[in-house]
Image (spheres, rainbow, N blue to C red):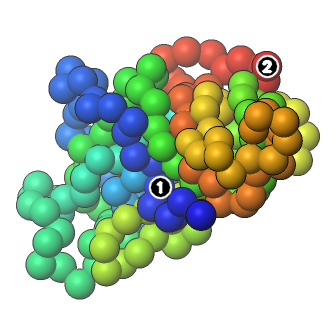
Amino acid sequence: MSTPRIGFTPSRQPQPDWIRRMPVKALAKEVAKGDALILVSGKVAAASAATNPTKAGFGVCLAVYTTAGRPLTFQNTKYIASGQVGQADVCYDPNQTYYVQCVTSVGLSNIGSNLMIDVSAGNALTGLSGQSVDFPASASTGEYFKLINVLDPSQLTGVTGTGSGGSANNGVEVKWNYHFLHAPTAAA
């Protein structure tokens, strides 16, 4: 069973002290609910899929709004399109964990690995992110997220589910690795 591609979903209720309404400037990528974000000149934008990104992560988008702070409920496009501006509620807690889809096979032996963001177009009708995570081509300390759990161990192969041979598109739990409030760490 694959996990839907809907971006980063908080695994527990975010602490209100770690949520801020921030101005958004969608650069080359739209900003949708569930997107991992970076901070550029005081405004948030969607994080890229780059290995060893040049900007640290800032937070995850919980909701998007017009520049007047109104929900996009009655808009045709439910995210902030590329090149547009708006506002977003952002959870910037470096200790918050998130559920997300991993596009490659992942197992319990991968826990502690660093993961990069895999970007895709968001869904204009629902306003949900198209981001997921993926393993980088080479080991790196600068990836945005770290794998901390595989959500459905019953689908993993190997003795008592400890193998690395899960199927692609499994759900995983991740935490920030490269965040503006702490330095990145090497993979376990």
Which quadrant holds the N terminus?
Answer: bottom right
Q: Nearer the viewer, residue 163 or 90?
A: 163
- Position of residue 61 in the picture relative to residue 167 (left or right): left
Residue in view at x 78 percent, y 23 percent: 187
Residue 181, can we see it? yes
Residue 44, can we see it? no
Residue in view at x 41 percent, y 75 percent: 123
Q: Looking at the image, is 84 positioned above or below residue 11?
A: below
Q: CA distance from mark 2 to mark 1?
A: 24 Å
Residue in view at x 75 percent, y 38 percent: 161
| Quadrant of the image occupied by residue 110 | top right
Which quadrant holds the C terminus?
Answer: top right
| Quadrant of the image occupied by residue 151 | top right
Q: Give the amino acid at mark 1.
A: Gly
**Coordinates of residue 52 in the picture (x, y in percent):** 75, 37
Q: Which residue is mark 1?
A: 7
Residues at discs 2 and 1 in contact (Cβ within 8 Å) = no
Other residues around mark 2 within 10 Å, as few (<14) / some (14–19) / many (≥20):
few
- Position of residue 57 in the picture relative to residue 69 (left or right): right
Q: Nearer the viewer, residue 149 or 13?
A: 149
Q: Which residue is mark 2?
A: 188
Which numbered marker is on residue 176? none
Furthest-bottom residue in this view:
76
Other residues around mark 1 within 10 Å, as few (<14) / some (14–19) / many (≥20):
many
Q: Nearer the viewer, residue 152 or 73?
A: 152
In the structure shown, which secondary structural element does the residue marked by tag 1 occupy?
loop
Residue in view at x 63 percent, y 54 percent: 170
**Coordinates of residue 49 in the picture (x, y in percent):** 67, 53
Q: Give the amino acid at mark 2.
A: Ala
In the structure shown, which secondary structural element does the residue marked by tag 2 occupy?
loop
Sequence-first disc among 2 and 1: 1
**Coordinates of residue 140 in the picture (x, y in percent):** 82, 31
